[in-house]
Amino acid sequence: MNNNQLRNAVLDALGKVMDPELGRDIVSLGMVQGLDVQDGVVKFRLVLTTPACPLKDTIKENARQAALSVDGVREVEVTLDSKVPSDKRISTAIKLPIRNIVAISSGKGGVGKSTVAVNLAVALAQSGAKVGLMDADVLGPNIPMMLGLKFAKPRVVKVDGKDKMVPFEAYGLQVMSMGFLIADGQPLIWRGPMLHGVIQQFFSDVAWDELDYMVVDLPPGTGDAQLSLAQSVPLTGVIIVTQPQNVALNDAARSIGMFEKLNVPIVGVVENMAGEFFGEGGGERLARGHGVPFLGRIP
């Protein structure tokens, strides 16, 4: 069997390997790329739709074994890669190299929204994704403290003749926050139009590098900041953070209703601070009642 015939046989074998989550074979999904067959040695890249795929090692091993099962193949090298799908609306609306924008929201303050935003962003970065974290909680910017970043004015560089701020970096994230632009402890007493301008500037006046995900930490509630963000850029989706008790659940329900009216997809609900003090299960009931996914419970 010559190299070309062997390549076709390997491709046929790989076409029988399924992605367990998507229910289709890895060849028709376009995951097998750069297939090279030379003298019984097979090399190819396995391109996943997210570097965080929990089954990536299983898919890789299944693909390797499928190729090895072909007569004439004596060695197989599989390289894992990823290409996060882009929300095409974003590139149309803003000229920035951002593939997806995910907002983290809550109906009330103090439910751990910023904590969830930081940990989600870091987890995505640790999985291999390129992640930005925008602290859009302009009146209460806590993200720099959570990431161990001290007050400092961002560097300014010229990009296409325009001054742009360079985001800070921590834990593999690109980070921008109002906390970098004001003195430590300085109160911000602003009206709605000023909030709208800042959120717009955090997109237009920051030199973001290419990002798979921009995670946006919103202020609590259903006010100007949420409307400004939804009107400024297309949101790929929003995650709602709540505590289990009724007061938090009622406010979270309002937050879900607002984003539904704005036609922003609800990624799901996270129940935070579950346990003896606040109880548990409220977030799951909220998600079920609104027909959206329940993403998880944090003690």
Image (cartoon, grey):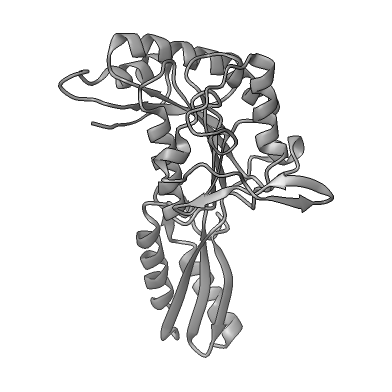
Residue drawn at x 49%, y 80% is 42
Q: Which of 24 and 199 is in front in this view?
A: 199
Residue 87 place in picture, x, y as percent: 64, 40
Q: Do we see residue 23 in this rendering?
A: no
Query: Looking at the picture, how far across and down is residue 124, in whole percent?
Result: 45, 48
Instruction: Look at 42% across and 47% down and name the residue there.
Output: 122
- Point 64% across, 22% down: residue: 195
Camera-side residue of 198 and 235: 198
Identify the residue at the far right of this view.
Answer: 161
Image position of 247 with respect to 16: above or below: above
Seen in the image, is 194 located left or right of residue 113? right
Residue 274 left/right relative to 184: left
Whether residue 84 is situated above or below residue 252 in the rendered picture: below
| Quadrant location, the C terminus | top left
Residue, x 44% and y 16% (percent of image)? 107
Residue 79, image x and y in percent? 48, 70
Residue 227 position within the rendered picture, expressed as x and y whole percent measured from the top left: 62, 18
Residue sticking out furthest to the bottom: 39
Q: Is residue 230 visible?
A: yes
In the rendered image, the vertical position of residue 48 relative to residue 285, given as above or below: below
